Image (spheres, helix red, strand yellow):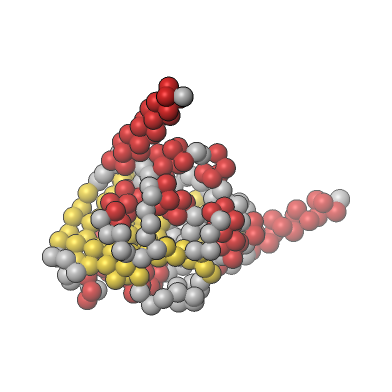
Amino acid sequence: MFKLFVKTTDIIYQLNMIINETNWNSKELENHYTHLHKYYSNGLFNLKFGSYYSSFKSLNILRNNPEYDILEIGIGAGNFYRLLKINKLKNKYTGADISGFYINLAKKIHNSNNFVLTSVDNSLNLEKKYDFVYSRNVALHQTNPLNFIQNLLDKAKSTLVIELRTRDLGKTNLDIKNSCQLVDNIWVPYVVLNYQELKDFLLKKENIKNSKITFNREYTVLGGKNGRYLEKELYYKNSKTATTTIVIEFNKKFEILETYEKDLNFKKGLKYFYHLFINKIKNKLKI
C-alpha cells in the first residue's frame, strides 16, 4: 500500500511540475545519454554520432584550424568530446552544462576535467569568447531558444555550430505546456522554431553581416516520437519539420547557403568503419 502511495504522489508531482530548462538538473536524467558509451565501440560510435551533419561540418572546420579552442554548451555524456578524441583532434576543449550530474558523468566516462558547470545564460565558469562554439539539440530544450542562441553568438569568435529543430509552416509556439517532451518521467521544453523566424533573427545581428552562413535541413516528422508532446500540426509532413544545423563562419564574405544533406557523414563514417575492419584483419595476418 505504501509503495502504491509513493508512486501515485510521484505521478501527481510530474503532472504538476513547472516545465523549464532547469529540469535537466533532475537526477532521473543523470544517465539518459549513456547508451552510446556503454554499447558502441569507437568505430560504431564514429559511424553513429559522426553521421550527423553538425558533426561532419565541425570535424572539417576543426581539422583545418587546430589552433581553435572549443566550447560545447550542453554536453550530455560527452558525445562530442569522444568524437573529437576518436578523430584525433587535439584542439583545446571546454564542455559546459547546467547539470552537475552530467558534468560528473562526463568526467567519469572520459577521465577528463575539461567539463565545467555553467549557468543558464552560459556566463558561470566560462571565458568571454571561444574560437569555436558547438551546441547540439540544446536550444530546443530552452523556454526561450532565441535568447539561448543569442548567448551562443556572444560566445563565438570564429565559428558557431547549432543543431536544433525547425518548421517551415506555422509560427513558433513558446507555450511550453504545448511544446514539451517527457524524458525519463521528467518534463522538459521541446520548442520547434519557425525556420523563417530563425533566419530573420540571425540576419538582423550586426556580427553576422560578414559571415558565411549554412542552413542545412533534414526533413523529418517530429510529432509522435520519443515522448514529445507537440501541437498537432507537427505530426504532419506538410508542416515540413526538420533537423536543422546552422553553421556560422564569422569574418568571411557574406554568403547564405541552404542545403539538404542527409547521408554525407554516414558515408564517411561507413568508410571509416570499413578501413578500421580491414586494418584489424591486416594486423592479425601479420601476427
Which residue is depicted at the point 46% across and 50% down?
A: 82
Which residue is depicted at the point 44% across and 38% down?
A: 43
- Front in this rendered view, residue 183 or 254: 254
Q: How many marks?
A: 0
Answer whether residue 183 is visible to the viewer in this image: no
Which residue is depicted at the point 48% across and 44% down?
A: 225
Residue 222 vs 114, above or below: the answer is above
Left or right relative to 164: residue 113 = right
Residue 136 vs 271, above or below: the answer is below
- Front in this rendered view, residue 57 or 70: 70
Q: What residue occupies the far top of the structure in this picture?
A: 285
Answer whether residue 190 is visible to the viewer in this image: yes
- Front in this rendered view, residue 221 or 75: 75
Give the percent coordinates (x, y) of residue 149.
Answer: 36, 68
- Front in this rendered view, residue 147 or 267: 267
Give the percent coordinates (x, y) of residue 257.
Answer: 18, 55
**Quarter holding residue 210:** bottom left
Which residue is depicted at the point 85% across and 54% down?
A: 2
Give the percent coordinates (x, y) of residue 274.
Answer: 36, 30
Left or right relative to 158: residue 34 = right
Residue 179 vs 156, above or below: the answer is above
Q: What residue occupies the far right of the structure in this picture?
A: 1
Q: What residue occupies the far front of the structure in this picture?
A: 287
Give the percent coordinates (x, y) of residue 95.
Answer: 46, 63
**Quarter holding residue 134:** bottom left
